[in-house]
């Protein structure tokens, strides 16, 4: 519904602006040509008046060749004007009285003559007749010479102009309608396509992605953003699916241990030592179960529940110190070296918007993995910051990851083939990745088998307002 | 006044280790103006030359990782580094290099002793050989960078290798 509105709006806007422009153009052309025609006609009349003055005023005192020359110009050479009338008034005595007589005789207002007397030039339009007056002086005497004629341009050319303009506006309207409909259809067609494609995507076929449009940068940005979103949704969906199937399996293993041990123990009366042994096994297994449940819970939370967590500004170096302390507390044998050689001088560059607990969990996981898989060799944690990112590099010299298994490391419950002798559930790395993603960061794992693993985490710096 | 230093680079993170070691060895109250220069022969096409832009050329080289790593170093040595910028040297003989040094008022050139140049495209060339041959009154410092874990980080765009160098020193 709203889409149709936008399309309609676009059509209307385009249409109205084209029509508006054409009409403005038409009006300007009409008005200016109309004005020009009157000016032009008045000029013609002025020439007429001057010729008439030469003939009748000068001619009275000159020879006949002079007069006949001007008469030829007047009669034969100049174009014929419709309803032409020329008047010559000789001025004698009082102006006001004479003006009254003149204006009465011609039936034009007295102000015409007043302006004529004042400026030597006057124009007047009555009905369709145009009057042009000129003040003519000869031998110290003044004459009013007035030429009048009907403006035939008005009747012919202006009508023609009106017709042409109206016709062109009509054509422009038609054209504008077609063009605006076509353009807006074209603009909205890819959006239609996107909408249809998005409609097809549901939880069953989350792997589908939108195709990039050709020659359409803005829409490609939208498509890219949408595909990114689909990527995230897909991973969290996958995590959830695997989570359910694997979690039940993982939880059953210690439970089977507990049940089996208890069952065997209860089959006959045992000695106190045997009961103690059984109970300690059960406790051990229950402890494992507890840890697994906790880890799974965290994974679940980070995977699906971004809103619950509180985000605040966290100083990454302090957080890393905390993580290292935790790691060293967990096992005395763990050795971590915190390399601050590239620590930025400005501590603002180390602040990240995030959830402290989750980030703590993520880093502890990575560092802990480093300790675990390198048999307690030194793990190096380095930190550095560019202007918009904090880089954390965690490097160990442990067993590494086989090259062809690198792509599976983020799958929940996946464990690389060389990790058999180490205890683990395969939850840590996916969990960490989820956490880093929640913070719009990036995690890169580089590893060589039996040489070590380098984990690089980039987190965006909190922008100070 | 900041000490102006030129460092030949091939836009790999590895090459920045030279700068890192150099800055580590420098006295605490020194201040530097660093030029990271890369040699690049220009195309012979007249239209390419007409529309030549260093900014675009740098963009085409796709050195975002390198720039990030430079920023890391700049943030670390914020008080020492008055300025650091990436530049491209487009000359092709010793005297052009000489002019470049004069024009930029370079006081010192820092080169790596044991690191081999890895061209980042067909047109890049190593400035070190010009630097070593120069007759100008420029101090030449040779830095020996430990090549630890070079097999681990063959990738020129791997920022984490910048950190590795330090580990080699600390161990």
Image: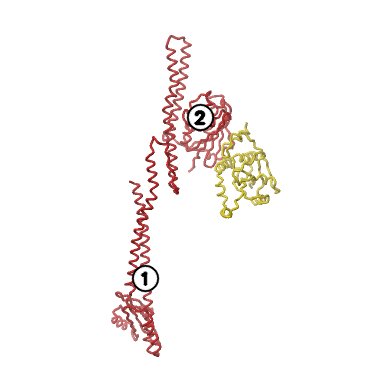
Chain colours: A red, B yellow
Residue B35 can be seen, yes or no: no
Residue A240 can be seen, yes or no: yes
Residue A146: give x, y in percent of width and height.
Answer: 34, 81
Residue B85: give x, y in percent of width and height.
Answer: 59, 46
* Residue nearest the observer in this picture, B1 or A192: A192
Of the residues tagged 2 and 1, which is closer to the observer? 1
Is disc 1 on the same chain as disc 2? yes
* Residue nearest the observer in this picture, B20 or B59: B59
Tell me the CA gap for discs 2 and 1.
87 Å
Residue B161: give x, y in percent of width and height.
Answer: 58, 36
> Which of the numbered marks, if any, corresponds to residue A327?
none
Local SS, label 2? helix
* Residue nearest the observer in this picture, A201 or A262: A201
Q: Is residue A425 left or right of residue A33?
A: right
At 54% from the left edge and 32% from the top edge, which residue is drawn? A403
Image-quadrant location for residue A144: bottom left
According to the picture, the residue beneath numbered tag 2 turns out to be: A365
Residue A417: give x, y in percent of width and height.
Answer: 52, 27
Vertical side of B94 occupied by A335: above or below: above
Density class for disc 2 (Cα within 10 Å; few <14, some 14-19, many ≥20) is: some
Vertical side of A389 occupied by A417: above or below: above
At 33% from the left edge and 61% from the top edge, which residue is drawn? A170
Tell whether label 1 touches label 2 (CB within 8 Å): no
Instruction: Decide which of tag 2 and tag 1 comes sooner along the chain.
Output: 1
According to the picture, the residue beneath numbered tag 1 turns out to be: A35
Q: Is residue A254 left or right of residue A163?
A: right
Q: Is residue A290 left or right of residue A177?
A: right
Density class for disc 1 (Cα within 10 Å; few <14, some 14-19, many ≥20) is: few
Write down the chain letter for disc 2.
Answer: A
């Amino acid at each position: 519904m709203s889409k149709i509105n936008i399309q309609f709006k676009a059509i209307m806007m385009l249409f109205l602006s084209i029509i508006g422009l054409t009409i403005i153009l038409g009006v300007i052309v009409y008005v200016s040509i109309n004005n020009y025609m009157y000016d032009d006609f008045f000029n013609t009349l002025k020439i007429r008046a001057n010729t008439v003055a030469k003939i009748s005023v000068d001619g009275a005192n000159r020879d006949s060749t002079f007069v006949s020359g001007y008469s030829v110009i007047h009669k034969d050479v100049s174009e014929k004007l419709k309803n032409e009338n020329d008047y010559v008034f000789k001025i004698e005595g009082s102006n006001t009285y004479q003006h009254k007589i003149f204006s009465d005789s011609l039936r034009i207002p007295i102000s015409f003559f007043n302006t004529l007397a004042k400026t030597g030039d006057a124009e007047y339009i009555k009905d369709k007749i145009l009057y042009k007056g000129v003040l003519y002086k000869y031998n110290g005497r003044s004459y009013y010479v007035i030429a009048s004629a009907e403006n035939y341009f008005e009747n012919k050319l202006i009508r023609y102009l009106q017709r042409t303009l109206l016709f062109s506006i009509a054509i422009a309207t038609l054209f504008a309608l077609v063009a605006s409909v076509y353009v807006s259809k074209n603009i909205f067609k890819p959006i239609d396509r996107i909408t249809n494609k998005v409609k097809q995507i549901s939880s069953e076929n989350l792997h589908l992605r939108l195709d990039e449009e050709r020659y359409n940068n803005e829409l490609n940005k939208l498509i890219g953003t949408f595909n990114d979103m689909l990527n995230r949704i897909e991973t969290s969906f996958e995590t959830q699916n695997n989570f359910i199937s694997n979690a039940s399996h993982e939880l059953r293993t210690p439970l089977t241990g507990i049940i089996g041990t208890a069952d065997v123990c209860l089959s006959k009366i045992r000695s106190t030592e045997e009961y103690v042994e059984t109970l300690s096994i059960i406790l051990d297994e229950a402890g494992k179960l507890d840890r697994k449940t906790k880890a799974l819970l965290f994974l679940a939370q980070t995977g699906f529940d971004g809103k619950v967590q509180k985000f605040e500004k966290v100083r990454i170096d302090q957080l890393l110190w905390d993580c290292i302390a935790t790691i060293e507390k967990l096992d005395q044998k763990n050795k971590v070296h915190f390399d601050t050689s590239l620590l930025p001088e400005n501590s603002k560059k180390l602040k990240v918007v995030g959830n402290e607990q989750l980030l703590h969990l993520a880093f502890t996981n990575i560092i802990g993995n480093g300790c675990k898989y390198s048999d307690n060799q030194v793990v190096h944690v380095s930190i550095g910051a560019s202007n918009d990112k904090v880089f954390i590099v965690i490097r160990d010299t442990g067993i590494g990851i086989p090259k062809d298994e690198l792509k599976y490391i983020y799958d929940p419950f996946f464990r690389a083939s060389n990790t058999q002798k180490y205890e683990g559930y395969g939850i840590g790395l996916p969990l960490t990745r989820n956490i880093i993603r929640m913070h719009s960061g990036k995690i890169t794992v580089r590893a060589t088998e039996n040489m070590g693993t380098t984990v690089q985490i980039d987190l965006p710096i909190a922008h100070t307002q | 006044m900041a000490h102006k230093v030129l460092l030949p680079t091939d836009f790999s993170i590895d090459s920045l280790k030279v700068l890192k070691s150099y800055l580590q060895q420098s006295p605490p109250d020194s201040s530097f103006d660093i030029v990271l220069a890369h040699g690049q022969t220009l195309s012979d096409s007249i239209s390419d030359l007409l529309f030549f832009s260093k900014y675009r050329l740098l963009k085409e080289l796709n050195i975002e990782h390198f720039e990030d790593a430079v920023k890391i170093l700049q943030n670390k040595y914020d008080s020492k580094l008055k300025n650091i910028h990436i530049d491209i040297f487009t000359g092709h003989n010793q005297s052009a290099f000489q002019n470049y040094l004069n024009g930029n008022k370079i006081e010192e050139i820092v080169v790596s002793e044991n690191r081999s140049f890895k061209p980042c495209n067909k047109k890049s060339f190593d400035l070190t050989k010009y630097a070593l041959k120069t007759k100008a009154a420029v101090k030449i410092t040779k830095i020996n960078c430990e090549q630890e874990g070079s097999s681990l980080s063959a990738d020129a765009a791997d920022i984490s290798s910048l950190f590795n160098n330090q580990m080699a020193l600390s161990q």
